[in-house]
Image (cartoon, helix red, strand yellow):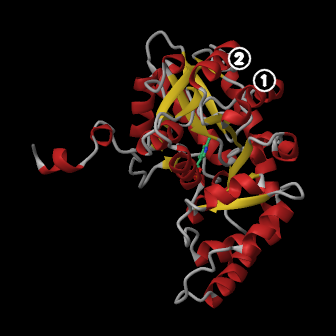
Amino acid sequence: MSLIENIIRPEIRALSAYHVPDSGGFVKLDAMENPYTLPPELRNELAQRLAQVAMNRYPVPSYTELKAAICANLGVPDGFGVVLGNGSDELIAMLSVACAKPGAKALAPLPGFVMYAMSARLAGMEFVGVPLKADFALDLPAMLEAIKQHRPAITYLAYPNNPTGNLYDAEQVVEIIRAVGDSGVVVVDEAYQPFAQASFMPRLPEFANLIVMRTVSKLGLAGIRLGYMAASAALLAEFDKVRPPYNVNVLTQAAAEFVLQHTRILDEQAAALREQREAMRATLAALPEVQVFPSAANFLLLRVQSKTKSADDVFANLLERKVLIKNVGKMHALLENCLRVTVSTPQENALFIDSLQAALLS
Ligand SMILES: *Cc1c(COP(=O)(O)O)cnc(C)c1O
């Protein structure tokens, strides 16, 4: 056996690394980033704040002030707290590690966010995927049956879902939370909450097994890497044991505390993007060669239904035009010929639509 075979777990060897394409020189519409920055005067003020940060010191690992600011400004109900992560990707990893008893399973609808399955497998958990319906709604009977059969320790529901963009029926989400009961937690992942304006956060007190997870990534701060999850104190105390003590760095902490004093700007940016999303959807809906799906997020899912061009052709042609979106057609059978595009500024959206039309004609 080789060194690699001697030391690396077979399930890790079988994985391929999460691939992030090099986007230098591209109009970048592949990762649901917010195209807007902070206004110059706030950037200057932030620079002053960051200059004061004691980078020679470790963070204070309780993160008391940042957590209090999140709870106060982002709608965490009284009596509930948060655990912070280096992006919600780290929170997902922490959940997996904490729950990975021998034989424990994680469950999520598919197509869904790939990190749920990836993280579960890295932690040694089995992952169970339950297909959505063709319109990307939850297949509730299939979900309830899978929950009964597998008794998942973690059930993930992205609300709204990535890469489909739709918001699941809230009553069905509640049925799932109840069906899981005290045999598992249900993670409602609200990465796109500012664009959905729907949330389970206020409903935390109703369900002992509910975790509401969010990130600042899609609302304009992807680069600082900060996620948070809110749940009962009893659950959070356990997950906090898995958290590396200094997982949020002092610059992120200072930047987040600063931005949380100016949430109005982020709210305005999210409102502008919601408006752009609807404008872009209407334009795309008028193109005969594409089907565009409803979205409660800051991206749109399209299906190429041209007689001469596949989604792969269109994606490749857009790359030649220096427009980077995400080709999700191979992710799942339900996504055949589908592409996902981030909603951006009016200029970039117009450029995308022009490029898409040109690609369809080429
Ligand atoms: C982008 C995304 C995340 C990851 O967020 P980070 O905080 O950047 O790690 C989590 N969940 C869903 C559904 C996402 O689309």
Q: Residue furthest right?
A: 78
Relative to 181, is 218 on the left or the right? left
Is there any visible trace of residue 160 in the rendered image?
no
Q: Can you give x and y, in whole percent of width and height, for residue 225 in the image?
A: 58, 62
- Left/right of residue 204 with respect to residue 292 in the rendered view: right
Examine the rendered structure and indicate whether residue 22 appears above or below residue 164.
below
Give SS at disc 2.
helix
Instruction: Please identify the residue farthest to the top as the structure is shown.
Output: 307
Quadrant housing residue 262:
bottom right
The x and y percentages for residue 118 are 45, 40
Judging depth in this view, the residue of 326 and 41 nearest the camera is 326
Q: Is residue 350 visible?
A: yes
Q: Kindly identify the amino acid type of the residue bearing the numbered disc 2.
A: Leu
Q: Residue at x 59, y 62 (%)?
A: 241
- Look at the numbered disc 1 and say if its residue's Cβ is closer than 8 Å to ligand 1: no
Residue 131 spot, x, y in % from top left: 57, 19
Asked if the beta carbon under badge 2 is closer than 8 A to the nearest atom of ligand 1, the reply is no
Badge 2 local density, few (<14 within 10 Å), some, or many (20+)? some
- The residue that mark 2 highlights is 140
Q: Which residue is mark 1?
A: 172
Circle 1 — which element?
helix
Q: Where residue 322 sits in the image (x, y, percent)?
A: 44, 44
Nearest to N terminus: mark 2 or mark 1: 2
As shown in the figure, which amino acid type bears the numbered disc 1? Gln
Mark 1: few/some/many CA within 10 Å (<14, 14-19, 20+) = some
Marks 2/1: CA–CA distance: 7 Å
- Pick the front one: 67 or 331: 67
| Quadrant in the picture for the N terminus | top left
Query: In percent of the image, x 72 and y 45: which residue is there?
Result: 211
Marks 2 and 1 in Cβ contact (< 8 Å): yes
Q: Which quadrant: the C terminus?
A: top left
Camera-nearest residue between 166 and 173? 173
